[in-house]
Amino acid sequence: SDSPDTLSMGFVPSQDADELADTVQPLADRLSEELGMEVQAEVVTNYVGLVEAMGNDQVDIGFLPPLGFVQAEQLHDVEVLLKSERFGDYEYLAQFNVRADNDEIDSIEDLVNSEGLVWAYGDTSSAAGFLFPANELMDAGVEDLNSQFQHSQVGAHDTALMAVLDGDADFSTSFDDARDNLEDDYPDIKDDIKVIGYTQPIPNDTISARPGLDEDLKNQVIEAFLSFNDDDEMLEVLDSIYNWTGIAEADSADYEVVRDTYERFQEDVSLD
Amino acid sequence: MREIEITKPKKPPMYWVKLGGIVAFIIIAYSVAFTNLDLESAFRWEQASTMLQRLILGPFTDAAAIERIPELFMMMMETVAIAYAGVLAGSILAIPFAFFASRNIAKRGSIGGKGVLNGIRSFPELLFAIIFVSAVGIGPLAGVLAITINSVGMLGKLYSEVIESIDQKPLEALRASGAGKIQVIWYGVLPQVLPEFMSYALYRYEIDLRSATVLGMVGAGGLGAPLIIASRSREWEQVGMMLLIIIVVVTLVDILSRNIRKRIV
Amino acid sequence: MIEFKDVSLTYPNGHQGLKNVNLKIEQGEMIVVVGLSGAGKSTLIRSINQLVKPTSGELMVDGKNSLAFNERDLRKMRTDIGMIFQSYNLVRRMSVLRNVLSGALGRTSTARSIFGLFKHEDKQLALRSLDRVGIAEKAYSRADQLSGGQQQRVSIARALTQKTKVFLADEPVASLDPPTSHIVMKDLRKINREDNITMIVNLHFIDMAMEYADRIIGMRNGEVVFDGPASEVTEKTFEDIYGRPIKEDDKMSEQDEETTENETASHKEGDSA
Amino acid sequence: MIEFKDVSLTYPNGHQGLKNVNLKIEQGEMIVVVGLSGAGKSTLIRSINQLVKPTSGELMVDGKNSLAFNERDLRKMRTDIGMIFQSYNLVRRMSVLRNVLSGALGRTSTARSIFGLFKHEDKQLALRSLDRVGIAEKAYSRADQLSGGQQQRVSIARALTQKTKVFLADEPVASLDPPTSHIVMKDLRKINREDNITMIVNLHFIDMAMEYADRIIGMRNGEVVFDGPASEVTEKTFEDIYGRPIKEDDKMSEQDEETTENETASHKEGDSA
Amino acid sequence: MTPAPKMDKIPILPRRSKLNILSILAVVAGLYIAAAYLTNAAPDRIINGLPQIINFVFGNLIPPNWGYYDTVASSLLETWNIALLATTLSVIFCLPIAFLSASNVNPSSILYNAVRFFMNVLRTIPDLVLAVIFVGLVGLGAMAGVYALFFFSVGILAKLISETIESIDPDPLEAIRSTGGNTLQVIWYGVMPQVLPHYISYSLYVLEINVRASVVLGFVGAGGVGLILNQQLNFFNYGNVSLIIIMTFVVVTLIDMVSIRLRERIV
Ligand SMILES: Nc1ncnc2c1ncn2[C@@H]1O[C@H](COP(=O)(O)OP(=O)(O)OP(=O)(O)O)[C@@H](O)[C@H]1O
Ligand SMILES: Nc1ncnc2c1ncn2[C@@H]1O[C@H](COP(=O)(O)OP(=O)(O)OP(=O)(O)O)[C@@H](O)[C@H]1O
Ligand SMILES: [Mg+2]
Ligand SMILES: [Mg+2]
């Protein structure tokens, strides 16, 4: 194991939240103070490059979304150190959205018993947008997602919601509650779109370390982050920028549910 | 006065067959396109208008956006530097590629040259970004490299087309005086094409000042990531402000480059 | 020595530019080629340094068939052949001096020429050549800011800078006024005489041809229809070459109104027969 | 009627192309402009249809100052002025016939011209003009496949197709052989006589100038140094215009080796004085 | 021989323009060094990264997963159809704009600058933002994709073609102006024949860009190859990605070949 002179961090802003952070600087500055070493931190809009960079020892710490972490662990033995806390939870939910005036669909049951509905979601690689809802549906009795629904992958949670709003899709799946994002453009959205159900909880974003990072350094990093929990000033920063209320230690086992879900769909992501 | 009749030259024997083939292909291509696509659309101006208003008027009225101007401007300057380093390297590297891909210079070898350029362009920008991040880590350098190679692909093609369409007569004169290949290029081709090269390079620079995807992807800093994140979270005032800043900078660059060009050409 | 052995040339569009040309040109001759517009004068001259490549026959240069030359030999041969172009062929965006200096490229190494490091004597020669054709003061102008005749003179200066054994000139004085024309033609002949340089010139002016040529070659429709010393040339010769009486043409200028139509027709026949 | 009132022209690079030119040209005159290369002949001719715009003075066309014309008036005026260019100015990629037909654009509606629907009589006229200059059989060739002289003739045919009141010709026969030159000059004079069309021609050939012109204008260094009927022109006139003896020049051709040096120098002075 | 002009050194360029060019070159190079320093572009970092790049290509991209052929083909067809329609429209609409933004054709400097500025603004909007705007405007689907690609392409084409127009040979235009031809006629008979080869190749080039840069289509729910590329990347299926690249290359090469053939005809 080796210890670098500068700690390099990559931050993938959570997609499954209505407020997205576009800077990691405040965190990096404090961390640098605590560790007594230079910390170089950048925001990255896609986790694939970050995961590869961690696998190649180019980046030490990655703020990875749950699915990204699971993949990174599988590919490059990336290790999870910490996870974020939002309003007391270490997990969040995904929701099923339907037009409020749609009387035929009122629960996930109705979806399972339907045929040929158009299902809009952002991205197959999104835990809240696709993987967890898909898992939920299969658990509830859907045999073949591809034949029972017409898939409409539209790039983002908000677009998926708009597809439902416009009648282009019968239902959509997104994080809880993606409608907040659209409220400025569509003030009535909460009246026009109803939520008919939620998935099982999804673990929050991770703070992970590249394989082979010096153990002492890792421990220092963990301690430094945990110390933010006792620092009111820092808690305020975490809340206002990242919507975090705290940071907690995490273990690979916390992500078992993501791993299972991912493995269920890993071979079968090429939906037409 | 007597009428003058001149017979038009005869078309080559396969002319009509070829023409028919081409017309048939075009008709098929379009009918496939029209039948395969659902081109229905309903304009919903009221719904989009809130969004457009936020995007266009937002930057001038939204306090949060105005407050961020200095910060966003500094980010833009980062982008300006990254794009500059990338495009300058790319626009120079593209020149040899372009000559190898030009039929009037490289003759048969141009097939290879064109192939290489096509290959570079077929490689998704995203993938270049991923590769460079995994090779040199996140940060501006990966951005510079990604911009460089993407510029080579595009500029190499545009350059080679300029080279293929120059006035051949001066080259003839140089060849007639026994000048070598490189000398012909240096004294006959470059003076003719440099102004166009320059304007394409500047155009590419402009593209890279705006294209956020690659820079956001590799964590290069600059305005790339904020722009993508702001539009993902539908903060149109912020998006509008960023676009406004980009427009101002691009316009400045445009004016500056036009003046430089005037002095050189 | 240059020798055409049964040389023919067909353009890609099927037009036959040269038809079975046989010629023998000794070192140091001063030859003027005359013929109607479109007769193939430019084609003949340009095939000597292979700016257009004959499609059959042999073209011997110093005993070797230049049509079989590879790229390298061809370049070496061209270094020894200077050329003045009918349409000037200048790089319009480059300065006059640089255009003229490009004549010295053949004897300048690639590296030096890339950095513009021409030898001092080459630069001297370039300026002297410009001076010789009377436009030294335009050395730093851009080529496209010159008048037609001035551009033609740049093209001449470029060829002078090349210092060669053979000189091809495609209507070198077409856009020049008579005094300048005479100066240029005399210069060409002087070079021919003093340095024993072969000079092959396309000309449209019969009087000039007669005045400056040792030998005259007449072309018509891609064929050589006359070839002999200038002293043997008579009025009849030109009538043959141009396919119609010369003097009569001049005489007709008094009564042309009635005859132009017919003439035009006959001219056309002469051109395409 | 065209009248130059104290017209001057300075090029953007500071070169003074015309200096206080005063001229009065009546409808139907046949004028030949002569002068050294670079004297400003092209500049004079091109300022009449404002391809270069004089920087001071007044240029009256039919009583109105054309320098004050707006875009529309200018276009209307140009429709009535045909022009033959020194460097042909053909669209190289277009066929000869289309190039010639473009002379008829001024009287063809935009819509018709975009679909190439020229009137039958215009097409006939175009073909006849081509025939007149002897290259009707090249009608469907691309312009850049022609010899230099043939391109010049296309440019003449284009101007003929324009059917105008004024004809400007910038060295229309520079690249032509003598017989063709005479045919073209005679054609120009015929047009001038028959249709009472003003004809302003730049020429380098003194003999041709004398033969075809009613009036001769001599230029030197941007100034008009001679202006009078052809009958008044003497050897001395040309000596004035060219800044040095003409005949002597010709005579010297026997003993040029010794004198060329001085001549070149004096020529240079004449050009740039 | 004529006495040579007395000069010890004969500059090839006049002093003034030499100074001009040298100072501009110095500024360009100086800015480059500054930019390289700011971006931390040390050459050793690039050299150290080379093995990883090679590793990535040979370890991940090779071999391609040929079995994925069907999906890629149908996605490419989707993309192709939308790209074809959008490109056709933009090829038509870019022409008037290109002529307005070429200073040698458009005499009015106000109109010229206005059009150029408007095009600058249009080009500044990233394609993804265009996509979201059009989804809002016309709803999800192919039509939104056509609109987004159309506006994006018009920006590129108008720019490229107006540059070409500004650098054509002015002599033939002069000839047609002198016959009294109006602006449209000058364009049709003087400009178009000269820019036609470029016009064709740029049009096909934009078609190629639209086929490649079709991530947008994913954002308007129109599917396409950009969507599956993203998907496969996010799942680290490099074998599939590599097949997408190969098949894109085939399409790009085909378009390039058509472009070459067409230009051969015209040049
Ligand atoms: N675009 C231009 N910019 C600057 N100077 C020019 C330009 N065009 C011509 N000149 C200069 O103006 C002078 C007159 O040029 P012009 O073309 O009228 O000469 P000319 O009498 O037609 O000569 P020639 O017989 O050689 O064609 C020349 O010295 C020339 O260098
Ligand atoms: N590139 C070409 N392709 C096809 N035909 C050509 C080409 N160049 C010249 N020709 C034709 O070949 C013939 C001879 O042309 P050439 O240029 O040798 O004539 P020339 O004697 O130099 O005439 P001029 O005195 O008009 O310059 C002409 O009929 C011309 O149309
Ligand atoms: Mg010729
Ligand atoms: Mg002139």
Image (cartoon, coloured by chain):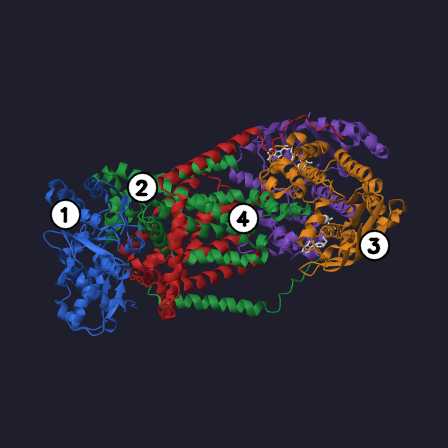
Chain colours: A blue, B green, C orange, D purple, E red
Q: Is residue A20 visible?
A: no
**Cβ(mark 4) to ligand 1 < 8 Å?**
no
Residue B77: percent from the left, percent from the top? 34, 39
Check residue C225 in the rendering and tell me which mark sits there, or answer none: 3
Answer yes or no: are tags 2 and 3 on the same subunit: no
Q: CA distance from mark 2 to mark 1?
A: 40 Å
Chain letter for the residue marked with disc 4 in the picture: E
Q: Is residue D13 left or right of residue C36?
A: left
Answer yes or no: are tags 2 and 4 on the same subunit: no
**Cβ(mark 2) to ligand 1 < 8 Å?**
no
Q: Amino acid at mark 3?
A: Val
Check residue E191 in the rendering and tell me which mark sits there, or answer none: 4
**Cβ(mark 3) to ligand 2 < 8 Å?**
no
Q: Is residue A130 visible?
A: yes
Residue C127: percent from the left, percent from the top? 68, 32
Work out whether E35 lies above or below B37. Answer: above
Q: Which residue is mark 1?
A: A226
Q: Nearer the viewer, mark 1 or mark 4?
A: 1
Check if mark 4's residue and mark 3's residue have beta carbons within 8 Å.
Answer: no
Answer yes or no: are tags 1 and 4 on the same subunit: no
Q: Nearer the viewer, mark 2 or mark 4?
A: 2
Q: Secondary structure at mark 1?
A: helix
Which residue is found at the position 68% from the left and 60% from the top?
Answer: B5
Q: Amino acid at mark 4?
A: Val
* Crowd class of label 1 (few under 14; some 14 to 19; many from 20; radius 10 Å): some
Q: Amino acid at mark 2?
A: Leu
Chain letter for the residue marked with disc 3 in the picture: C
Q: CA distance from mark 4 to mark 3?
A: 42 Å
Q: Amino acid at mark 1?
A: Leu
* Crowd class of label 2 (few under 14; some 14 to 19; many from 20; radius 10 Å): some
Q: Is residue D241 left or right of residue A204?
A: right
